[in-house]
Image (cartoon, helix red, strand yellow):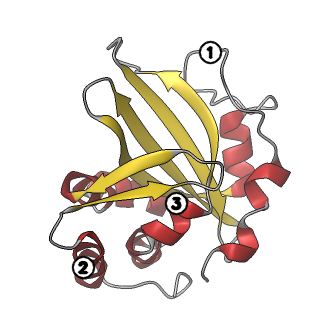
């Protein structure tokens, strides 16, 4: 499903069914990081800017929509690779990044979770990225090079990220 991709309408329809009448879903990563998925999350993940990031990273928009439409499975096999303060300086906001390898084009889903004191953890976005590029983004020590340093970052390695590959749909 991921390699061939799906249309944006089909992705949105699948995600709306996943949320159901409650319009929200709690998802848990492989290492226990919980986040809420809601209609705002869907809008962000299906946005033109999220799709553009995946396309700029060498994937198709249909592949992006396919992976997003399977966010429950993708998130449940992901691991947290970094945490950092909000880049705009909001003291009550922390940004968490999770990753999970995919079965095609040496790709990974790179998930952003936004944590606020009032709203808790919410899935904010998802982009497709090549694992080698993700490693360079995270740096040798597993720290997201684009974010300020935080002492409480998980130990990240290629093995940690790629360990979930067998459980993610293809």
Q: Earlier in the sequence, mark 3 or mark 2?
A: 2
- Whether the residues at callouts 3 and 2 have beta carbons within 8 Å, the answer is no
45 relative position to 152: left or right: left
Q: Secondary structure at mark 2?
A: helix
Nearest the viewer among 136 and 141 is 141
165 relative position to 39: left or right: right
Q: Position of residue 23 (x, y in %)?
A: 18, 63
Residue 59: in sight, yes or no?
Answer: no
Q: How many marks?
A: 3
Q: Considering only vertical position in the picture, is 91 above or below 123?
A: above
Instruction: Compute the Cα span from label 2 to label 1.
Output: 39 Å
Q: Which residue is mark 2?
A: 17
Residue drawn 72% across the image and 39% down it: 136
Mark 3 is surrounded, within 10 Å at the Cα level, by few (under 14), some (14 to 19) or many (20 or more) other residues, namely many
Q: Secondary structure at mark 3?
A: helix
Residue 121: in sight, yes or no?
Answer: yes
Disc nearest the viewer among 2 and 1 = 2
27 relative position to 130: left or right: left
Nearest the viewer among 121 and 145 is 121
Q: Earlier in the sequence, mark 2 or mark 1?
A: 2
Instruction: Compute the Cα span from label 3 to label 1.
Output: 24 Å
Q: Which residue is mark 3?
A: 75
Q: Secondary structure at mark 1?
A: loop
Quadrant that contains the C terminus: bottom right
Nearest the viewer among 94 and 46 is 94
Residue drawn 33% across the image and 16% down it: 92
35 relative position to 155: left or right: left
Residue drawn 68% across the image and 35% down it: 138
- Whether the residues at callouts 3 and 1 have beta carbons within 8 Å, the answer is no
């Amino acid at each position: 499903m991921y390699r061939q991709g799906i249309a944006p309408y089909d992705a949105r329809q699948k995600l709306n069914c996943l949320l159901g009448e409650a319009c929200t879903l709690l998802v848990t990563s492989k290492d226990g990081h919980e986040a809420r998925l809601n209609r705002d999350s869907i809008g962000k993940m299906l946005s033109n800017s999220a799709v553009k990031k995946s396309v700029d990273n060498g994937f198709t928009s249909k592949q992006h929509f396919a992976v997003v439409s399977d966010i429950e499975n993708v998130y449940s096999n992901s691991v947290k690779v970094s945490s950092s303060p909000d880049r705009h300086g909001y003291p009550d906001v922390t940004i968490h990044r999770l990753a999970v390898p995919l079965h095609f084009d040496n790709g990974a889903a790179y998930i952003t979770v936004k944590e606020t004191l009032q709203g808790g953890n919410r899935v904010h976005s998802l982009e497709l990225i090549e694992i080698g590029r993700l490693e360079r983004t995270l740096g040798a020590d597993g720290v997201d090079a684009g974010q300020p340093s935080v002492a409480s970052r998980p130990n990240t390695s290629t093995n940690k990220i790629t360990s979930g590959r067998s459980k993610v749909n293809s």
